[in-house]
Amino acid sequence: MILILTDDSDPHANHVERRLRERGAEFLRFDPGQFPTNAHLSLTFSAGCTQARLHWKDEDFDLSCVNSIWYRRPMPSVPHPEITEPVMRNYVEEECRIFMHDAWNVLECFWLPAPQPVIRRAELKASQLKLAASLGFELPPTLFSNSPEDFLEFYRQHNGHVISKLASSSFYRFTAETFNRYTHIVSKRDVAYARTIRFCPVIFQAYVPKRVELRITVVGHEVFAAEIHSQHSNHTRHDWRRYDWYQTPYGIHELPRDLQQRCIELVERLGLCYGAIDMVLTPDGRYVFLEINPNGQYLWIERATALPITESICDLLIAGDESHQPAQPELGVCAHG
C-alpha cells in the first residue's frame, strides 16, 4: 500500500491519486493535520513484532502494509479545541509532531522524496551550493551574511549587479499564504539601508544574465528539463515565480547528458529520490546552478510541457523498491523541523 501524506487541498496529490487509481494501485491519503483531533494512531511492540494502526473516518488501516510513503505537503498536527491554555496547546502540538514523525519512521518502506529529517537537511541553501560546486556545477558568486560591511564590499565587487533572496523558506510559516518574497534586484535605495542587514542573514548573489531559466525535475534516475522563457515578459524577467502565463513560453529542454548525470548525483547525494532544480542558461551558453527544492512543485510545468513527471512518480511509489532509496547524507549540520 502507498501512504500519501499531504493536506486535503493539494492538487499534486489529487493528480497522482487519480493516476494511481487508474493503474489499480492501493493507496491511503492522510493529512497529519487530522491528528489527534480526528484520527487515532497506535504503535504496538511485542515479541519482536511491530504493529501500526490508524483509525480515521470510521475505518481502521493496518500501516504495516505500507511499502511506499510520499511525504508530500503534510500539515502540522492541531490540538483538540478543548485544549485552550496556550502553553499546553504548544506542548501538545510539539508532542504530536514528534510522535507522528517517529511513527512514520517505524514503517520500513520506500520514501519519496525522503524521510522528513533528510528533507530538512537537503533544504539548507549553503550546503546545497557546497555540494553542487563539488560536483562541478557552475555557481553564481554568492554571499550569505548579516554583515553590512561584507554586503557593501560584495556589492562593489559586482558593480551593483546583485540580487537578494531569503536564506530559507521559514518566512512563509510566519506570513499569509498568499504573500511571497521573490528574488529582488538590489537597488541603490536598498544599499542606503545596508545597516539593517545585521538583524537577519540574507543571501546575495551576482546577477546572472538569462537566455532561459530551467526547471529540472529529477525523479529517481529520470531527468525532466523544462525551459522557462522568462525574459519574454518584464513581469518575470528577474523571477519566473511571478508567473505571466500568456507572455512566458514554456518548452522541453535538451539537457546535456553529463549535466543530467550531475543532477541525478546531486539528488542522490542529498539523500533524496526527487528534487526540483532551478538553473539559468546564460546568453553565452553556460548552465548556472541556483538551488534545489527537495519537495518542489512540478504539476504546472508538466501541464505546460507534457513531460510525464506524474507517471515517473507513480512508477516509484508503486515499485516501493528500497534499492531506489539513496543512503542518508552525511552532512555536518542538521535543521530542526
Image (cartoon, rainbow, N blue to C red):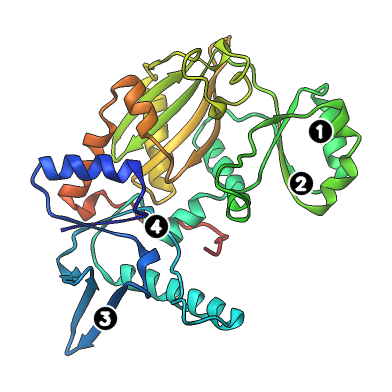
- Residue 17 visible somewhere in the drawing: yes
Question: The disc labelled 3 sits on which kind of residue?
Answer: Leu
- Numbered label attached to residue 145: 2
Instruction: Residue at 22%, 76% (x, y): give it.
Output: 52
Disc 2 versus disc 3: nearer the observer: 3
- Numbered label attached to residue 294: none
On the image, the x and y values in percent for residue 28 come to: 21, 58
On the image, the x and y values in percent for residue 154 come to: 81, 33
Whether residue 285 is situated above or below residue 147 in the rendered picture: above
Please name the residue that numbered disc 1 is placed on.
154
Please name the residue that numbered disc 3 is placed on.
43
Q: CA distance from mark 4 to mark 3?
A: 20 Å
Q: CA distance from mark 2 to mark 3?
A: 44 Å
For label 3, the crowd category at 10 Å Cα-Cα, with few meaning under 14, some 14 to 19 and many 20 or more, is few
Label 4 vs 1, first from the N-terminus = 4
Please name the residue that numbered disc 4 is placed on.
74
Q: CA distance from mark 1 to mark 2?
A: 10 Å
User: Is label 1 in contact with label 2 (beta carbons under 8 Å)?
Assistant: yes
Instruction: Residue at 51%, 31% (x, y): give it.
Output: 136
- Where, by quadrant of the figure, is residue 210 drawn? top right
For label 2, the crowd category at 10 Å Cα-Cα, with few meaning under 14, some 14 to 19 and many 20 or more, is some
Q: In the structure shown, which secondary structural element does the residue marked by tag 4 occupy?
A: loop
Label 3 vs 1, first from the N-terminus = 3
Q: CA distance from mark 3 to mark 1?
A: 53 Å
Image quadrant occupied by the N terminus: bottom left
Residue at far bottom of view: 47
Question: The disc labelled 1 sits on which kind of residue?
Answer: Phe
